[in-house]
Image: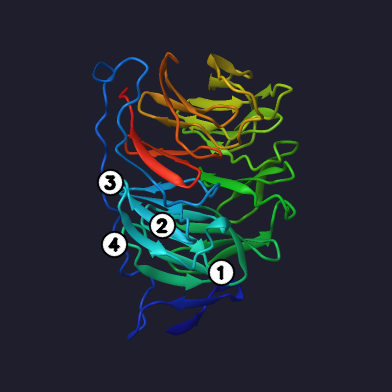
Amino acid sequence: MTVLGAGGGAGVWWLDRGEPKSPTADVPPAVATPEAAFVSAIDVPPGKGPKALWGPLDVVADEGELPLPVRDVVIVQAKTGGLLALSVTNGKERWRARNIDADAGFVSVADRLVVGVDKNGVLNAFVASTGAPVWQTQSGVDDVLAADDTHVYLVTKDNELRAVDAWTLATTWARPMTSPRSQNGPAKAAVGRKRLVIHGRDGHCAALYTETGETDWEIKGQGTDGQAPALGDNNVAYFGGGKLTARRLDRGDFLWEEDAHRTGDWGTPTADGDLVFAINSYHAYRYTTMREVRFPVSDWYEVLDGVGPGTVNPPAVEGATVWLHSPDSSYVQVVHKATHDHLFFIKMKRQGTYQLASAGNRVFVARGGRIGAMPVFGT
């Protein structure tokens, strides 16, 4: 195993033997996403949900990280520890990475690599579809925040924020983290339009230029419960917390905000084109963000049965459906995206919050250590 130097003084291990070559030379192109067929309301009895595509399988960690769909696999935090990749088409195990600390986060780079940190604080990359190890680099890594097509953005144990090139393994830039470390968990982040948007547990949100790490804009006083920013295709960044806040992504201009009810903060929003979906306790809303309109345009809202503070986990949007957590985490209400007509409920046995993710005309539903995949109605 050859040891080479990397930018920022971190060590790099290339996982090939023999003649030195690029650590990513053998990474295959991203595979095609196998899309599930839409189901029709005609084929499903009123109020009844469609049959699951697969599962539920008793293979995921309780209250772990959200499932991460990556083309033909969905990456989850395994019940026995580490990462587990399941086929999106049938739920069968594709690969495992047992030494990865999934609590520290895991991300996809260009749908070709899955990157996480191992129990020794070393960053590891795997081929997304097969799990083949590609490289190890950096040291003292504490959390993996986000990734785009070129870089992985991480936080070290001494609270330094780094951008690591996933293809050359060089450290492109390093700077102090935007928020202090919190005992309540890591910050959350998302990447879009050459901005790394970070939502710290102190309520401080910042957008950094991905090329340099310099701050473009920032806001304070947002949620402190682990809400992740949501980035829309319409150049808007959304934040949950005491207010549901919309900002222009590439400049930070104020667009609109909506106060939370007394019963709790806004959870993590989900962006879908010009739309954003968010839950505040027992109310779920769909808003449209319109150019030059500095207030939220509420298209519909849904009152959810149940009593409780709700969850910060985001709703899922796929096809013509929106999947909404109940405030007491006892069920998921599925409504039509355009009309918010009630379609069906999902109830999964076990306890705990629901964790939803979607891709390829599927919604992945996890709760209490089990996960399954559901089809959706078409647009």
In the rendered image, which residue does mark 1 sit on?
Answer: 119
Point out which mark residue 84 bears.
2
In the rendered image, which residue does mark 4 sit on?
Answer: 28
- Whichever of callouts 3 and 2 sits on the residue coming sooner in the sequence is 2
Q: CA distance from mark 3 to mark 2?
A: 14 Å
Q: CA distance from mark 2 to mark 4?
A: 20 Å
- Whichever of callouts 1 and 3 sits on the residue coming sooner in the sequence is 3
In the image, residue 206 sits, relative to residue 81, either above or below, namely: above
Number of numbered discs on residues: 4
In the rendered image, which residue does mark 3 sit on?
Answer: 90
Question: Tag 1's secondary structure?
Answer: loop
Three-letter code for the amino acid on which mark 1 is drawn: Lys
| Crowding near the residue tagged with mark 4, few <14, some 14–19, many ≥20 C-alpha atoms within 10 Å | few
Disc 3 + disc 4, Cβ < 8 Å? no
At x 71%, y 30%, the residue is 242
- Whichever of callouts 1 and 4 sits on the residue coming sooner in the sequence is 4
Three-letter code for the amino acid on which mark 2 is drawn: Leu
Q: CA distance from mark 1 to mark 3?
A: 30 Å
Q: CA distance from mark 3 to mark 4?
A: 23 Å
194 displayed left or right of 46: right
Decide if residue 261 is in sight here: yes
